[in-house]
């Protein structure tokens, strides 16, 4: 049995990238493993959400998370800020993280570009807090999308450095996990990059069928079918990538063959893609609405989750303090 940790930031509604990149992997693992799934609401502070919005965002993401099928009866589902032990481990790990390596992190460089007016130290040490989340429960598997690969590599570095510095074998070196062959990067609908919460290129689990049809029909494609010998554009490849996760294999094969034979009509491809996305998201959307109206249930889930997470977290912290040399008088 593996110990599994994974999290989602509470900075916006969940989209297909979150679902296929990460959550679907959690679902595959939750019954056989010791799983901790949490909402990263400390990480969310790096983008300075307004206090009036913070709680609502957390609640929405919690409902969306559970609506996907995460089962709080088998997994520990909690809110990061309900487990304050993580901030102490973060502090301790910060002593092992070097400014140079943090500055070289791809996500930090992206953030400098995206929010040049708010390059706070929390952004710089984001990977350290993430390592604290994972090492807190001494996890060895972390289901995430491709964009988190570098953060996982850094987590392994911090774990190894701790073990070497104190001459112990305390922290496992966790691996990013995908049940398929490789970590996924789900593209957006705008012809480039990955689907994101704030890039305006996403399909959200909470979107209505009308919104999904509208977004998909507007997705960027080529102007006509391929001409023989021509390479498909990035935008068209992205639509096929999306189809490969939401549609059944025969449907994908049908459109791939049409495309290869230079006979494709992008309107037909998009119509099919939109319907297949709706088939995946519709049951989740209904469940989100049910959960959002059951505040008492949500409160019970997170208070039980925090209790369980704190048992594991405080044990780790006790042992880490002992290893570092903090002793009672
Ligand atoms: P966040 O909230 O950005 O994304 C949550 C999960 O969704 C995955 N993901 C994607 N996968 C494939 N294609 C995409 N387009 C796509 N967009 C998002 C992410 O890889 C992630 O797995 N730093 C994390 C939250 C976090 C965490 C942790 C995760 C904090 N502590 C500890 C694991 C373990 C993040 O920003 O996720």
Image (spheres, rainbow, N blue to C red):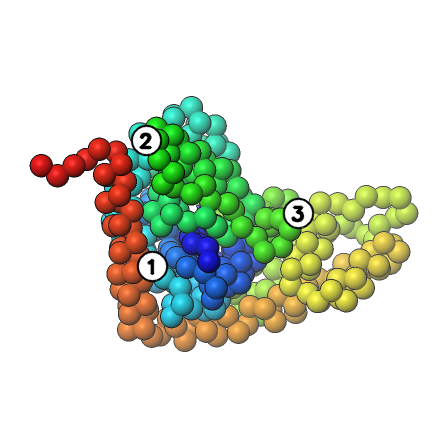
Crowding near the residue tagged with mark 2, few <14, some 14–19, many ≥20 C-alpha atoms within 10 Å: few
- Residue 135 placement (x, y as % from top left): 37, 44
At mark 3, the secondary structure is loop
Quick check: 298 left or right of 271?
left
* Number of the label disc, if any, that sits on residue 166: 2
Could you tell me which secondary element the residue under label 1 belongs to? strand
Residue 117 place in picture, x, y as percent: 39, 33
> The residue tagged with tag 2: helix, strand or loop?
loop
Q: Residue tagged by mark 1?
A: 78
The residue positioned farthest toward the top in the image shown: 100
Q: Is 1 placed above or below 124 here? A: below
Quadrant in which residue 297 is drawn: bottom left
Q: Position of residue 207 (x, y in %)?
A: 52, 65
Spatial separation of the CA atoms under disc 1 and disc 3:
35 Å
Q: Residues within 10 Å of mark 1 (few under 14, many from 20)?
A: many
The answer to which of 106 and 205 lies nearer the viewer is 106
Q: Which mark is residue 222?
A: none
Q: Where's residue 214, x and y in %?
A: 61, 63
Crowding at label 3, few (<14), some or many (≥20) Cα neighbours within 10 Å?
some
Q: Residue furthest right?
A: 228
Mark 1 vs 3: CB contact within 8 A: no
Residue with the mark numbered 3: 191
Q: Residue at x 29, y 60 (%)?
A: 308
């Amino acid at each position: 049995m593996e110990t599994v940790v994974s999290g989602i930031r509470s900075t916006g509604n969940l989209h297909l990238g979150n679902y296929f990149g990460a959550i679907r992997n959690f679902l595959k693992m939750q019954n056989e493993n010791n799983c901790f799934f949490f909402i990263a609401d400390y990480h969310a502070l790096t983008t300075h959400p307004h206090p009036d919005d913070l709680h609502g965002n957390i609640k929405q993401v919690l409902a969306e998370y559970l609506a996907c099928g995460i089962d709080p009866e088998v997994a520990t589902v909690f809110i990061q800020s309900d487990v304050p032990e993580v901030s102490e481990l973060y502090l301790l790990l910060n002593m092992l993280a070097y400014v140079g390596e943090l500055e070289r992190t791809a996500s930090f460089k992206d953030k400098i570009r995206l929010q040049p007016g708010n390059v706070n130290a929390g952004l710089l040490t984001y990977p350290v807090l993430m390592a604290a989340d994972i090492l807190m429960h001494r996890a060895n598997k972390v289901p995430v999308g491709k964009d988190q690969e570098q953060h996982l590599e850094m987590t392994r570095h911090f774990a190894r450095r701790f073990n070497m510095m104190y001459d112990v074998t305390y922290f496992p070196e966790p691996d990013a996990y995908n049940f398929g062959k490789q970590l996924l990067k789900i593209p957006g609908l705008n012809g480039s990059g990955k689907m994101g919460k704030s890039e305006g290129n996403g399909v959200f689990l909470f979107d209505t069928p009308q919104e999904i049809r509208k977004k998909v029909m507007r997705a960027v494609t080529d102007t006509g079918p391929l001409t023989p010998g021509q390479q498909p554009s990035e935008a068209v490849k992205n639509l096929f990538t999306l189809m490969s996760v939401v549609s059944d294999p025969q449907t994908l094969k049908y459109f791939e063959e049409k495309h290869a034979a230079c006979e494709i009509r992008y309107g037909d491809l998009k119509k099919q893609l939109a319907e297949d996305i709706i088939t995946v998201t519709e049951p989740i959307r209904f469940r989100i609405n049910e959960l959002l109206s059951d505040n008492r249930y949500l409160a019970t889930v997170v208070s039980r989750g925090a209790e369980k997470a704190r048992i594991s977290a405080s044990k780790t912290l006790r042992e880490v303090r002992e290893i570092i040399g903090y002793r009672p008088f």
